[in-house]
Image (tube, rainbow, N blue to C red):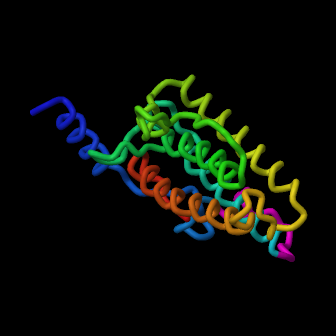
């Protein structure tokens, strides 16, 4: 038996021993109690722009919540072989996707982690090193801020900055990408320490 198989078996045993838990007391199938949920802005969404931007904000915060309280080893822990998916990889991947948003909107930007030699560099480079974790968070936050500034530069979401696709369609696709990966984050976090919810 090779070392990868042995490591995977140990990880499977450790995951099987976990107890599912949540700190929520009001709704015990939630991540946190409603009063503790930072995603509840209290601001009413009144139009398309505010609705879409609030959706994007919601899923960005969900990514942060799913990673909260984890160390570098936990952040880099892979799901199940042969997947390279980890929460750290997910943060790096979403930094790439924030930049991809602006590429789809017409900006000429290089990749952050991926390359022609390693098209999965956002995932494969997610190693258990505190510096790699800190860099991933810095990069993701910077890219998200640049995306927000880019969107703010357009009064009309029907604008076609790249000449073919409307900005609103790119924004909806970005929200969908976050929502998809937040589902992965649910499973990744549960496998790490048993925490569940939302």
Name the side, left or right, on which 38 lies relative to 173.
right
The answer to whether 154 is drawn above or below residue 112 in the figure is below
171 is within the stretch colored magenta: no
Identify the image quadrant of the N terminus: top left
Q: Residue at x 49, y 24 (%)?
A: 129
Q: Which residues are magenta?
A: 33-47
Residue at (65%, 54%) from the top-left corner? Answer: 104
Q: Main secondary structure of the magenta part?
A: loop
From the viewer's perspective, tell me whether residue 8 is left or right of residue 77.
Answer: left
Q: Position of residue 40 (x, y in %)?
A: 75, 64
* Mark count: 0
Residue sitting at x 75%, y 49%: 147
Residue 61 point in image, percent of width and height: 67, 53
Residue at (51% x, 39% y) in the render? 88
- Taking the image as shown, residue 43 lies to the left or right of residue 55, namely right
- Residue furthest right as drawn: 155
Where does residue 164 sit, x and y in percent of width and height? 69, 65
Q: In the picture, which quadrant includes the C terminus?
A: bottom right
- Membership of 44 in magenta stretch: yes
Left or right: where 24 falls relative to 56: left
Residue 48's place in the image compared with 64, above or below, is below
Extreme residue toward the left, this view: 1
- Outermost residue on the front side: it is 163
Q: Nearer the viewer, residue 117 or 195?
A: 117
Give the image quarter of residue 48.
Answer: bottom right
Is residue 50 placed above or below 110 in the rendered structure? below
Foreground of the two, 46 or 39: 46
């Amino acid at each position: 038996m090779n070392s990868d198989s042995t490591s995977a078996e140990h990880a499977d045993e450790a995951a099987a021993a976990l107890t599912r838990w949540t700190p929520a007391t009001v709704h015990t199938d939630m991540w946190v109690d409603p009063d503790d949920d930072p995603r509840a802005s209290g601001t009413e969404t009144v139009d398309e722009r505010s609705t879409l931007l609030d959706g994007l904000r919601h899923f960005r915060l969900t990514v942060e919540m799913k990673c909260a309280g984890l160390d570098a080893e936990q952040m880099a822990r892979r799901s199940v072989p042969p997947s390279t998916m980890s929460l750290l990889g997910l943060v790096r991947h979403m930094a790439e996707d924030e930049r991809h948003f602006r590429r789809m909107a017409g900006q000429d930007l290089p990749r952050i982690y991926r390359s022609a030699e390693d098209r999965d560099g956002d995932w494969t480079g997610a190693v258990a090193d505190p510096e790699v974790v800190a860099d991933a968070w810095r990069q993701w936050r910077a890219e998200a801020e640049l995306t927000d500034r880019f969107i703010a530069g357009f009064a009309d979401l029907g604008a076609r900055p790249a000449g073919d696709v409307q900005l609103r369609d790119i924004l909806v696709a970005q929200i969908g990408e976050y929502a998809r990966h937040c589902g992965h984050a649910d499973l990744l976090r549960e496998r790490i320490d048993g925490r569940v919810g939302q």
